[in-house]
Amino acid sequence: MVETARAVEVAPLRRDAVLEAVAFSAERLLLARGWHDVVVEVLGRLGAATDVSRAHLIRNKKATGRPQDIADAARLESSEPA
């Protein structure tokens, strides 16, 4: 029962942190010269807000002319310092 009460207390704080991180990310991405300039910072902020140790951004592209054939085109990662 104590864990449930704690989860109810923490949920709004987590939601607020995620919304703040999304707003920060949108602003940084819109104001940057290019998304590559800010993507690590954005992933770091989103990762911290969601309480994860790693955040990945993967851009997919078609490997062939068939839609079902997809390959990773770019892979970026942000992780907590060790």
Image (cartoon, rainbow, N blue to C red):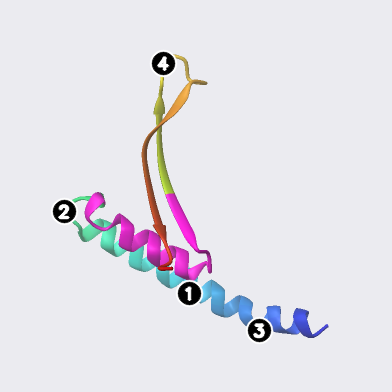
Q: Which residue is mark 4?
A: 64
Q: Which residue is mark 1?
A: 17
The reply to whether residue 26 is visible in this rendering is no
Quarter of the image holding residue 64? top left
Q: Give left or right: position of 50 versus 38.
A: right
Cα separation, mark 4 vs mark 2, equals 31 Å
User: What residue is at 42 percent from the left and 42 percent from the top?
Assistant: 58
Cα separation, mark 2 vs mark 1, equals 26 Å
User: What residue is at 55 percent from the left and 80 percent from the top?
Assistant: 13
Quarter containing the N terminus: bottom right
Q: Which residue is mark 3?
A: 9
Residue 50 magenta-highlighted: yes
Circle 3 — which element?
Answer: helix
Q: Give, as a single range, the part of the protein colored magenta.
A: 36-56
Mark 2 and mark 1 lie on one chain; the one further toward the N terminus is: 1
Q: Which mark is residue 33?
A: 2
